[in-house]
Amino acid sequence: MKRPDVMILLTAAACLLTLVGCGKPQGPEYAKVSGTVTVDGQPAAGVNVTFHPDATKGTKGPVSAATTDDQGKFVLHGPGGKEGAVVGWYKVTVECPPDPGMFSSPSGPSDGSKGPPKPKDCKVPKKYGDITKTDLTFEVKAGQENTFNIELKSE
């Protein structure tokens, strides 16, 4: 083979490898996750829901989290706003947000905002906010929308 033919073959091979590699997703596989949180049958508005990967069941990756709306509904997002959670098993925490006054001066938050609204009379039991005490576990499955209804009882 002449030298120019070798260069053409090498260039073509490099292009082909580049194209083949572009079709594969980068990073872990995500699936959409949504649901509703209720306490004593009532929507839990403004509570934080966090899915923590369960390494004991082989799940690795970042946490995904959301805050419930007025109807107790949530849609999880991971780092960078990516919708959903990495496919696998999770321990789930649900907790009332901290009192906005905990992180501000008597005149209000330093950035001038009023801070996040605190849900009225939040009744989520404290055990669900502790990763070592919560008994909530869910499996996020690939290729489908995962809907989890979290029904809690107040203490």
Image (cartoon, helix red, strand yellow):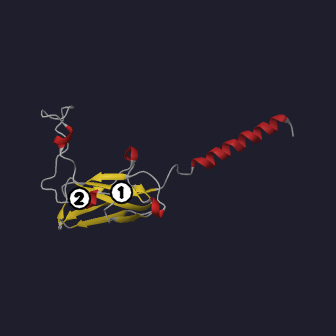
Extreme-front residue of the structure: 132
Asked which secondary structure carries label 2, the reply is: helix
Q: Return the x and y of residue 42 as percentages of the image width and height.
A: 16, 64
From this view, report whether residue 37 is shown above or below residue 9. Answer: below
Residue drawn at x 42%, y 60% as measured from the top left: 54
Provide the residue designation for mark 1: 51
From this view, report whether residue 110 is shown above or below residue 97. Answer: above
Q: Is residue 142 visible?
A: no
Q: Return the x and y of residue 136 as percentages of the image width and height.
A: 32, 65
From this view, report whether residue 81 is shown above or below residue 53. Answer: above
Give the CA separation, mark 2 to mark 1: 16 Å
Residue drawn at x 49%, y 61% as measured from the top left: 58
Provide the residue designation for mark 2: 126
* Label 2 or label 1, whichever comes before in sequence order: 1
Q: Would you call the spot at circle 1 few (<14 residues within 10 Å), some (14-19), or many (20 or more)?
A: many
Q: Is residue 139 visible?
A: yes
Q: Amino acid at mark 2?
A: Lys
- Along the horizontal axis of the image, is 37 left or right of 119? right
Image quadrant where one finds the C terminus = bottom left
The front one of 15 and 24 is 24
Image quadrant where one finds the N terminus = top right
Residue drawn at x 12%, y 32% as measured from the top left: 107
* Label drawn at residue 94: none
Asked which secondary structure carries label 1, the reply is: strand
